């Protein structure tokens, strides 16, 4: 995320900042990012986006042209010039703690904690929320889709094909990263491959097949250029008929796969598999795509459709049934001038929040299966048999350690998912989770 | 959209490009972008995003580091080096025709048409789709929300507050633009204000109110810095009690509005209005927000909730109930070497497409109300009493005219929406539209 994101934020972040500056409010404040309520159709969420928010936080600066624009806004008319000098020299000086990427989380649990002079913590709000939102929602979606593809224990692959339906070019890249962390094999997005080292996949376009006078000619011309990557799109005209022709072509010797992108995938995949097998090509893979999601994939797996790989586009990149989490970034405490902590919470109906800088303590059983979470104050000792989930990431404006590799994050996500009780992995039924509070923090609730 | 979007595309765009290059296929092809089927809960869509795709198309270049990365991908191993030289010199040389931004469109109608050597037209696919997708889907959402807010004829305003829930910082900016074109008064996103000249709005954060020891102190401190922009967030603790205090404070003299962000907005707005009126402040506006959408707003309007302005976040910026359109970019014809047109279409079940470079002819009645659309070939004369909707935008790689101002686009969108029959403006019932085909094009259907 580049520095030019500095103004891609809500106006009130900077009016609040100006207000704090001018009123000389510089108390150290703690803000927590959490999901207020679980969305429908989700039993767990996957923390994702930390690497992007860390990059954003560490590189956030206000350029001269940013400040020049702000000065043109009538709302800043009465703001002291000193505020703009403050912005000119802005550099985050606070601390960030967070759940590692790939960790499972539930509603009401802080996943990112920012502790800094209140003006600095405030300014981060919009981008920290939007980056964590898109990546966490897509990572959870990917985990669901991959689980559906492997419901019978067969390790079928899922590839993110969503860039064309993502919310703009940047969203496509962010979604590709999250989808990979959530368990996809890779993505169609080239830039995500370059930026994050994610495997990049692609087959061929219908327009390629149509551009030639005959389907066979289109395939031969493709094979001539990509002999080692020959996955043919066979559904432009007549799927089964096409595969019958393909198995007789010379390229059959190095054919890797065929892709079905329309029609009744259950029936077609069975027919296509039969044609391939009969032709002595049992190793040729079948890739299916076309408006797929976890439910359609689960049905295909249940019906024993012989599909090896699924390409998932729109539902993956937009998390179509749940395109946003109810993520909030809440002030939970302020350190007063005398060093005393002032706990902060909203008391308005339906929006009551528990104050205090928190920690999430997770408990597993002897087999390593998730049992419950306990939310306590960060200053408390971990209850017996639990592990704290939030870890320091940035201290006094400096990164504590380089982020883990994306492979490590992806493996961690898979391991954490494996530790969920089976009920949580059911894509049809929502499971509610046991979350307790320590006595200390329960006493602070409004 | 900056040049660094060059690789934020599906891998197959560039494998197809390499395939065309190496096979010396350079026929002039026409691709059309259209929405395959109307989404549920939508009776019309709003064309939006043309300015961004034009900028993308005209500035698309492949930098040396882009090409260096492509060369590392195993899939390009057998590709001739000449292809990479081609990419190094890439500059779009074709034509683009499109519906003007703000135009109403329906399923199956081309909204953008790209005619160029097939390799150039192919490469544009991913970003053209994703940019048109996010902006068109949000513009239609905004039109619905604004219609709901004005269902009783009162011109209530709607403001986009969605940046924190958008799919990353860039998506927040794109959504803000589309929301403004769709009828919003403005956005909370500062960058959208700077980039597009959209009015920027903001109130205050709950954390601001909580940062001080008393609500009254928070308001006074805010007022001292922003005396001309005093819209107070009154729902942090006890909404009505808060307003009772506010109307007795000195800042009441210049108070502009109060914002309710939680609770039963119908009841609270009535109570708050009564307190304000009784205190002699009938001009102070009430702004409501908090997970609003067109349905909740319609209920509030129906219940005569005295709300003057609505802030809409998640539902606006993600078009939550429909976060993606079924937009496709289809090859419809190729010009053969002899100048003959070869019509192209898919014939696979459920995905049949009508070939040929098209035009959409729109018919209005004498009162200027939309009657029906007729899809024909671009080469046909407009049927009597109709107007063609697709207009040239880029010719031989050059922009024909500067894009209209965003104000002009927003006004055009409002005018086009006003010309819809009232049934189409009903947010509850889907209306199906009359779309005909000319005899000439009907003969080309597969």
Image (cartoon, coloured by chain):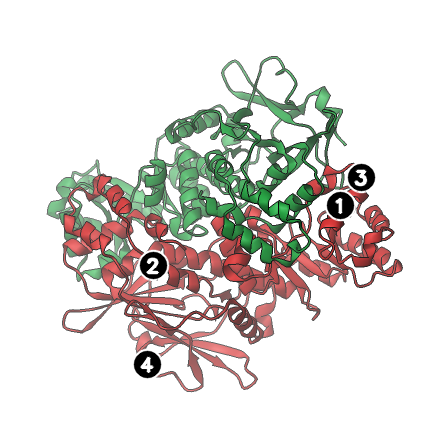
Chain colours: A green, B red
Binning the other alpha carbons within 10 Å of mark 1 as few (below 14), some (14 to 19) or many (20 upward) gives some
Report whether A172 appears left or right of B150: left
Mark 2 vs 1, N-terminal side: 2
Task: State the mark number for residue B214.
Answer: 3
Q: CA distance from mark 2 to mark 4?
A: 32 Å
Whole-percent x, y for residue A69 in the image: 55, 55
- Disc 1 target residue: B221
Name the residue at 41% across, 27% down: A404
In-front residue for pair B399/B416 = B399
Q: Residues within 10 Å of mark 2 (few under 14, many from 20)?
A: some
Quadrant assignment for the N terminus of chain B: bottom left
The residue at which mark 4 appears reads as B380
**Dot 2 falls on which chain?**
B
**Mark-to-mark CA distance, 3 and 1:** 11 Å
Q: Earlier in the sequence, mark 2 or mark 4?
A: 2
Give me the C-alpha separation between circle 2 and circle 1. 47 Å
- Residue lying furthest right in this view? B278
Tell me how many marks there are. 4
Q: Is B364 situated left or right of A443 in this image?
A: left
> Of callouts 3 and 2, which one flags the residue occurring earlier in the amino acid sequence?
2
Q: Which residue, as the protein is rendered here, is positioned at the far left?
A: A250
* Cα–Cα gap, marks 1 and 4: 66 Å
The answer to whether B104 is drawn above or below residue A188 in the figure is: below
Both labels 2 and 1 in a single chain: yes
Establish if B255 lies above or below A2. below
Using residue A378 as the reference point, say whether residue A286 is left or right of it: left
């Amino acid at each position: 995320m580049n520095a030019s994101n500095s103004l891609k934020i809500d106006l009130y972040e900077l009016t609040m900042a100006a207000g704090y500056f001018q009123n000389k409010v510089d108390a150290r404040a703690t803000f927590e990012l959490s999901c207020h309520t679980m969305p429908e159709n989700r039993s767990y969420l996957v923390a994702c986006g930390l690497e992007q928010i860390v990059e954003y936080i560490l590189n956030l600066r206000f350029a001269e042209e940013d400040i020049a624009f702000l000065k043109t806004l009538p709302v800043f008319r009465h703001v002291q010039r000193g505020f703009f000098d403050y912005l000119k020299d802005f550099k985050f000086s606070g601390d960030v703690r967070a759940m590692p990427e790939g960790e499972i989380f539930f509603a009401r649990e802080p996943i990112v904690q920012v502790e800094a002079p209140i003006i600095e913590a405030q300014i981060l709000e919009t981008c920290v929320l939007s980056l964590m939102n898109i990546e966490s929602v897509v990572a959870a979606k990917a985990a669901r889709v991959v689980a559906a593809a492997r419901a019978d224990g067969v390790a079928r692959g899922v590839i993110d094909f969503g860039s064309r339906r993502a919310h703009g070019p940047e969203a496509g890249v962010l979604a590709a990263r999250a989808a990979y962390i959530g368990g996809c094999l890779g993505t169609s997005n080239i830039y995500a491959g370059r930026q994050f080292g994610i495997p990049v996949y692609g087959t061929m376009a219908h327009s390629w097949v149509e551009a030639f006078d005959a389907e066979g000619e289109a395939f031969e011309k493709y094979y001539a250029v990509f002999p080692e990557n020959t996955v043919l799109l066979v559904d432009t005209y007549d799927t089964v008929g096409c595969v019958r022709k393909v198995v007789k072509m010379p390229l059959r010797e190095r054919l890797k796969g065929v892709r079905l992108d329309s029609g009744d995938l259950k029936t077609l995949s069975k027919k296509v598999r039969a044609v391939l097998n009969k032709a002595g090509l049992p190793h040729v893979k079948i890739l299916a795509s076309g408006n797929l999601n976890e439910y359609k994939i689960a049905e295909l797996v249940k019906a024993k459709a012989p599909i090896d790989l699924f390409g998932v586009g729109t539902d993956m990149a937009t998390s179509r049934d749940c395109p946003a989490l109810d993520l909030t970034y809440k002030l939970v405490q302020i350190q007063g001038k005398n060093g005393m902590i002032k706990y902060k919470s909203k008391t308005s109906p339906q929006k009551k929040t528990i104050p205090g800088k928190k920690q999430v303590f997770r408990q597993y059983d002897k087999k390593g299966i998730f049992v419950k979470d306990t939310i306590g104050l960060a200053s408390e000792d971990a209850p017996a048999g639990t592990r704290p989930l939030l870890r320091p990431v940035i201290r006094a404006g400096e990164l504590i350690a380089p982020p883990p590799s994306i492979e490590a994050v992806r493996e961690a996500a898979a391991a954490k998912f494996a530790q969920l009780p089976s009920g949580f992995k059911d894509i049809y039924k929502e499971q509610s989770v046991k979350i307790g509070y320590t006595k200390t923090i329960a006493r602070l609730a409004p």
